Amino acid sequence: MIHIIRNSIPNLFTLLNLFFGFLSVMYSALGDYKNAAILILIGMMLDSMDGRIARMLNVESELGKELDSLADIVTFGVAPAMMAYYSYFSDFGKFGMAISGLFPLFGAYRLARFNINAVKSSLHYFTGVPITAGGGLLTLLTLFHGKMPAIILPLAFFVICYLMVSTIKIPSLKDIPLPKYGIIITLFLGYAIYIVFKKEQHRFPYFIYVAIPLYVAFISYQLVKIKRNNPKK
């Protein structure tokens, strides 16, 4: 029984990642882009945690790896694309709908290529931009697109699509004891906290109350782990 529970813990984090991606799509449809972005942020943190927890518990499995890919295509492929569609591309009718659909298509191809080459992949770099980073960047740009020149979002959309399927070597930063894509996460949190303390408290993204404790708890765990692995002599 204990073994079953241990095996299920990382998969639970992965399923929560997928669920938050689904919720993000729903909030984008409602026009609540702040909470839609925060939900993708939470998904990024959960995506950083499930693999580490699986290794910590020594319960890595092929099921977990496949489940992780399915969750990623929803949270970092479909959800950011829907956010971009409802906030920008919907103005172009069916053409905008078709364009928005390219992002999860490119992301799915990138994930499939990564999965079949995982054994050959270097620990020091990724081939092409990971879908998690691509989805996070698209979400961040979509959130701020009203404060930037109109050409930035569609240009970035196509550039990110290309980078995901490119053969460009991207540093993996796996040795850094922080959640992956920490810069994107920090920018998200900074923006959300800014909204909370602005004179628009009635419109703040309430999912920030989930994101911040989750981030603090995980960082605290990593710092404790580093301290245990490197005791003072």
Image: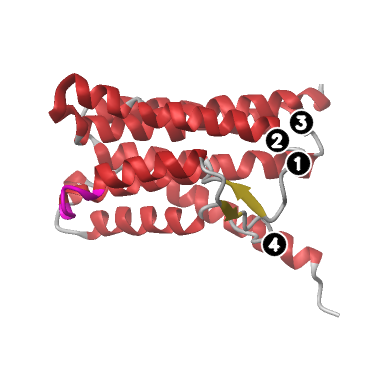
Is 62 placed above or below 184 here?
Answer: above
Give the residue drawn at x 48%, y 32%: 107
Query: Mark 3 or 1, which is nearer the eye?
Result: 1
37 and 215: which is toward the camera:
37
How much space separates mark 4 and mark 1, taking CA atoms?
32 Å
Q: Mark on residue 224? A: 4
Mark 2 touches mark 1? (CB < 8 Å): yes
Query: Tag 1 or tag 4, which sits nearer the N-term?
Result: 1
The image position of residue 13, as x and y in percent, is 59, 33
Q: Mark on residue 141? A: none
- Residue type at mark 1? Lys
The image position of residue 57, as x and y in percent, is 79, 40
- Residue type at mark 2? Asn
The image position of residue 29, as x and y in percent, is 24, 25
How much space separates mark 3 and mark 4, taking CA atoms?
21 Å
Is 19 placed above or below 233 here?
Answer: above
Query: Tag 4 or tag 3, which sits nearer the N-term?
Result: 3
Instruction: Find the magenta span and give its range.
Output: 147-152
95 and 41: which is toward the camera:
95
Element on which disc 4 rests:
helix
Residue 164 visible: yes
Q: Mark on residue 120? A: 1
Q: Residues within 10 Å of mark 3 (few under 14, many from 20)?
A: some
Q: Which residue is mark 2?
A: 117
Query: Tag 1 or tag 3, which sits nearer the N-term?
Result: 3
Query: Tag 3 or tag 2, which sits nearer the N-term?
Result: 3
**Residue placed furthest toward the right:** 233
14 and 232: which is toward the camera:
14
Q: Which residue is mark 3?
A: 6
Query: Mark 4 or 1, which is nearer the eye?
Result: 1
Q: Is residue 2 left or right of residue 188?
A: right
Mark 2 touches mark 3? (CB < 8 Å): no
